[in-house]
Amino acid sequence: MTQAPVLKVENLQTRFKSVQRGKYVHAVDDVSIELYPGEIVGLVGESGCGKSTLGRTIVGLEKATSGRVLLDGVDLTTLSGAALRDSRRALQYVFQDPYSSLNDRQTVGEALDEALVIAGTRSPEERDRRTKELLDQVGLASVVRERHTRELSGGQRQRVAIARSLAVNPRVLICDEPVSALDLSIRAQVMNLFLRLQKDLGVACLFIAHDLALVRQAASRVYVMYLGKLVEHGPSQELYDRPSHPYSQMLLASAPEVDPRIEKNRRGPLMIGEVPSPTNPPSGCRFRTRCPLAVDDCAKALPPAHVLSPGHTAACTFAADLHRGKRSALLQQEVSAA
Amino acid sequence: MNMLNPILARLNKMPRAALITIGLFVALGTFAPWLAPQDPSTQNLLDAGLGPSAAHWLGTDHLGRDTFSRLIIAANTSLVSVGSVLGVAMTIGILLGTIAGYHRGWVDDLLMRVVDVGLSVPSLIISLAVIGIVGPGYWTMVLALALAWWPMSGRISRAVAVSIMSKPHIEALRVLGASPWRIYFGHLLPGTIGSVMVYATADAGTAALAVATLSFLGLGIQPPTPEWGQMLVDALPYLESDPRQVLLPGFALTMAVIGFNTLGESIALNRIPKPLTRRMLAMRRAEVASWSKEKSDA
């Protein structure tokens, strides 16, 4: 990967005012990620770990407290008004819920046409041609154009939403669980469509999901997030085979298997306890309160990201041991349970 | 419970009855000048205070004017004045409400405190005060009532606007880079108007009553324009000798108010009488099934 990253997020931090006076919810804390042209990168983690907030902050739906978002080297956090709207357009977002992300009052044609108008396509003939092209790209018949979005099924609506975000020729697509609101049968269809489009158009994509199998299938690299921080990052093949952060190990092991014979032998409930409150995150390593490997030092300082192999890093004191298989959060858990 | 069932069943038909009543009211109001059989202002003292006859279907009033024609024209007066009161009030309310809902923050706080003040004073008292200062007249009445009425629609539209603004489809527009004008005029305002209009139906009955009240007090619509409240006060001296003159406009007003209230209530409870819905749904479903050309690889 000698190319320059198309999207670079540097030390991004998003805080919300807490209901408790003077306190803040640390939703995203000091996160840096990079996206190279044409690749799909997964972002996984439990519910409430801040992965959606990270995506929303990148596209500007939430205000970043500090940090920078660089799109093609342009710092979006320094722009405002029309300049920001124009630059940020290359960064698009696909929402989880296709039922609320489209305006019920619009027809499919109107929704796509509006996106094209916003993108600055002046001539009506050109917009008409592009609308047809977009519908064809997402595999919808052109009769759908005249229909109100409320008349479509979930899968059809998500196709329209994808078409709308493609209307502005994005360079980066941030997909926030784009298929998890859909029926299982539709999910694979939309996912395949999405992968094909991503390949054809060469859009870089940050794929936020909690479905680990889906991320493994789609993404070339994966970021693992826990309580507002990145804990591990690596090529998906390696990360899935040799997870080197206790949290990643437990997260991967907690995913149910499809094969009932394997599922039967899978170790029991792995994640112990609740995610701590992001208003009062634990000192040092944030995972230490649930980590079977935690030692006293973990509370003192945030462990630095250890580079385990090219492109594979994990923020754990024992990362090197875990990577070599010398130690395992899962084994440790069994030992302490016994 | 068994004894209650017939009553409950009848209550379920209320929305439809209300719809018919209001439909009749609106139709009469709209086409009043063509429907009224006689000139409502022609006096004929020789025929004064007559009961129903072939010439005057519902009799005449104390000046010999045809009561039936006057009732019909009064429906028109009522419809127009209620329409203008709600129109003016909702324009102000929706405008301020959507601005508050769009901007939030201090703009929202300021506008909503103004609304709170408006709501804390009874609407009739505000109107009486305004008319007292400016003097009676048709437009004074409309503006006075609108002034009393806008805070309610302002609060409702603010609530609707806030919920629309938090929907992902507005967020999607922001991500697409839509200008604030496009979001406000293209999506927020039309969405709010649609929802707030529904609530207006519930208010129409109260507004009709307020117009009649002010006219009854001589502060609203001035004679000789026929108006139900004013017909009531005209007929008041003859309450004992000829109650028909009081009962007829009273009955018309009551029907209109009950009709609007029932309709508004059933709409609020989402029991909209839609005789056509079922067939339309079936047709729609049959079509939806044929749209997807799901490709085998997609």
Image (cartoon, grey):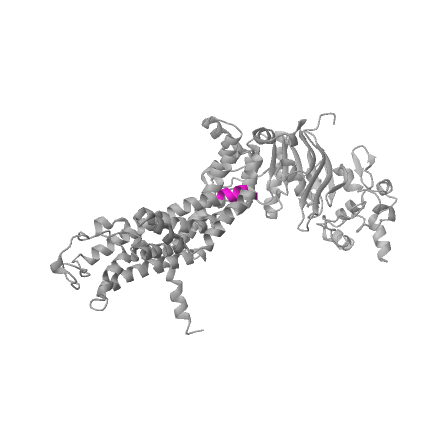
The answer to whether residue B233 is magenta is: no
Position of A211 compared to B60: left or right? right
Report x, y in % for residue A102: 53, 42
Judging depth in this view, the residue of B55 and A304 nearest the camera is B55
Instruction: Give the overall secondary structure of the magenta segment.
Output: helix
Q: Residue furthest left?
A: B46
Picture layout, residue B101 above or below residue B206: above
Magenta segment range?
B98-105
Quadrant occupied by the N terminus of chain A: top right
- Looking at the image, is B213 positioned above or below residue A4? below
Dividing the image into 4 quarters, which one contains the C terminus of chain A? bottom right
Residue found 57% across the figure and 33% down from its top? A166
Residue B143's spot in the image, x, y percent?
A: 36, 47
- Residue at horizontal 65%, vertical 35%? A205
Q: Residue at x 43, y 44 (%)?
A: B92
Instruction: Out of B110 and B200, give the one closest to the viewer.
Output: B110
**Residue B168 makes an appearance in the image:** yes
Q: Nearer the viewer, residue B129 or A219?
A: B129
Residue B72 picture quarter: bottom left
Return the x and y of residue A155 as percentages of the image width and height. Answer: 56, 43
Location of residue A184 in the rendering, given as x and y in whole percent from the top left corner: 61, 48
Q: Is residue B273 visible?
A: no
Nearer to me, B251 or A221: B251
Residue B4, compared with residue B275, is above or below; it is: below
Q: What number of labels is visible?
A: 0
